[in-house]
Amino acid sequence: MSSADIYRELILDYYRNPRNFGKLDKFDIDSRDTNPLCGDEIEMQIRVGDGKKIEEIKFVGKGCAISQASASMLTELAKGKPLEWVKEVSKEDVFKLLGNPDLGPSRVKCALLGMKVLKTGVYGYLGAHYEDQDGSDPMV
Amino acid sequence: MLKTEVINVEKIREDFPILKRQVHGKRLVYLDNAATTQKPKAVIDALVDYYSRYNSNVHRSVHTLGEEATAAYEAARGKAAKFVGARAKDLAFVRGTTEATNLVRFAWGEKNVKKGDTLVTTLMEHHSNIVPWQLLAKGKGATLKFVGLQPDGTLDMGSFESLLREAPKLVAVTHCSNVLGTINDVATICAKARKAGAITVVDGAQSVPHMPVDIGAIGCDFFGFSGHKMLGPTGIGALVGRSDLLEEMEPFHGGGEMIKEVFLDHSTWNDVPHKFEAGTVNIADAIGLGAAVDYLTAIGMDKVREHEVRLIAYALQSLREVKGFRAYGPEDPEKKGGVISFNLADVHPHDLATILDEEGIAIRSGHHCAQPLMRWLDVESTSRASFHVYNSYDDVDALKAGLLKAGAIFKI
């Protein structure tokens, strides 16, 4: 796959016009992480509604097109879902959102930063601990 | 612009086996030399030769291999010292510049820095010339202060002078910025700092590989550099120090090699520089560094420098024609090392690096271990192209074509 395929119109659109970008006035979950290699940065805030659902979700961040687009796409997917759903989200789901680009190991970390932030925040809220086993840490 | 060469790049390229490699089916265009350089066959052969013919520990064994290894290791020290205008006795081998600054932090700083003292570094430093001093200051209750920068990416000497009025214990400064390429007038800085009573530490990681360096003329108290950025192996570098300071300093690590006599309640230290080389030293890579010094000396560091000045001048002129291109740091190639940090419109450097990689072009993208500088530049990160002896005008042309492609993909 060529870089022209990785950086399709859709990813560039989410990079330049990220959906759900911003902060919430009231939130129950606030989760932030960075990727020290790139300096990518994602913070997500979630307001939990009835039935432990993700009533509202927003993110702010800085970084490459892949990290920002994937985080934005993930917030769209997550909105309205039960918190438990977050436990089921996999890296394959994120790759699918991005159009299954052929990313090298270091760029996979960019793609999965948003998922790591989402999972860390929601797991913490549910009293669980999220162990990053999804390839966003090259040591795992 | 004339594309003239002061060195024979075609011939030099033949000395570097890795340059025969293709990346994604394209010729490797290696422009990440400020991170680490490639190695000529002479350096690789020196490592293989040591391990295949005379691998042995040094300064211990009286057998033939031990004698040969010791002679080669100490010859490498002599070569490295001469290369930077120092005496072999004043040069301790370390893992690299990071270990050099940390050695000064522990072996000099622990004894000499006190509560309430001021330490000075600058906003353009690599983390390896910031964090050790932060740790030292924190541990001692001292304060670390930063010399500011001017809009053109040079040091603000007014800010430096005013910090000197606080009588700092230490002034740590880079010879050449790994991001901006700024070459600092370290001789003047060290003279002023010394007059103010400060010990000076110069980070030579980006100067020694690219230009003639004479530590004696700089007049600093400590100077560190890394082998792997000057065609040598990883894991070897040097700290050069003022001999009276080295003599009175405490050891860095305790163990074998660095002692003279060991008793149950105390020990005495080996002579400088062995006092700072505890344990089995990195013999092979020191010998490899010696080979790199030989290789660079044969080309001539004045020619290496002139070659890079011409490449930087060509690159700055050529790349500025690309829409959205913005370079950081001094614009005069004479005032800059072989480094160009830049951004291309709103394309994130990591995305750019991915696109260029597909063309076989290796650049660095990120914060370059200089986050305070990134904040000063008001950017998250930059892309960086950096040159060495095997780079030429065709590499700049390839980079330009890659930037144009990235611009097209990102619809700039």
Image (cartoon, coloured by chain):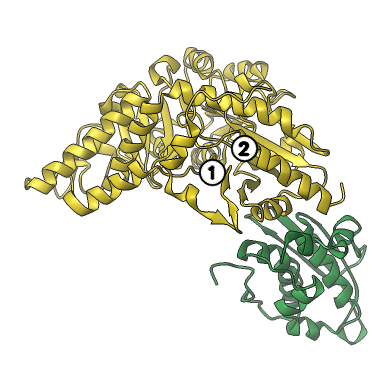
Chain colours: A green, B yellow
Horizontal and vertical percent for residue B254?
27, 47
Q: In this figure, what is the number of numbered marks?
A: 2
At 34% from the left and 39% from the top, the residue drawn is: B289
Q: Tell me the kind of residue under disc 2.
A: Asp
Q: Which residue is mark 2?
A: B394
Residue that appears at 78% across and 42% down: B344
Label 2, label 1: how far apart the Cα atoms are: 21 Å
Residue annotated with mark 1: B35
Relative side of B294 to A65, left or right: left
Q: Residue at image x 77%, y 49%?
A: B405
Mark number displayed over residue B339: none
Q: Horizontal placement of B122 versus A72: left or right?
A: left
Amino acid residing under circle 1: Ala
Q: Position of residue A119 (x, y in %)?
A: 73, 75
**Chain letter, disc 1 residue:** B
Which chain's residue wears label 2?
Answer: B
Rendered view: A29 above or below B272:
below
Residue B382 spot, x, y in % from top left: 70, 43
Could you tell me which secondary element the residue under label 1 belongs to? Answer: loop
Front position in the image: B325 or B156: B325
Splitting the image into 4 quarters, where does residue B333 fall? top right
Q: Is residue B358 above or below residue B288?
A: below
Q: Are marks 2 and 1 in contact (CB under 8 Å)?
A: no
Viewer-nearest of discs 2 and 1: 2
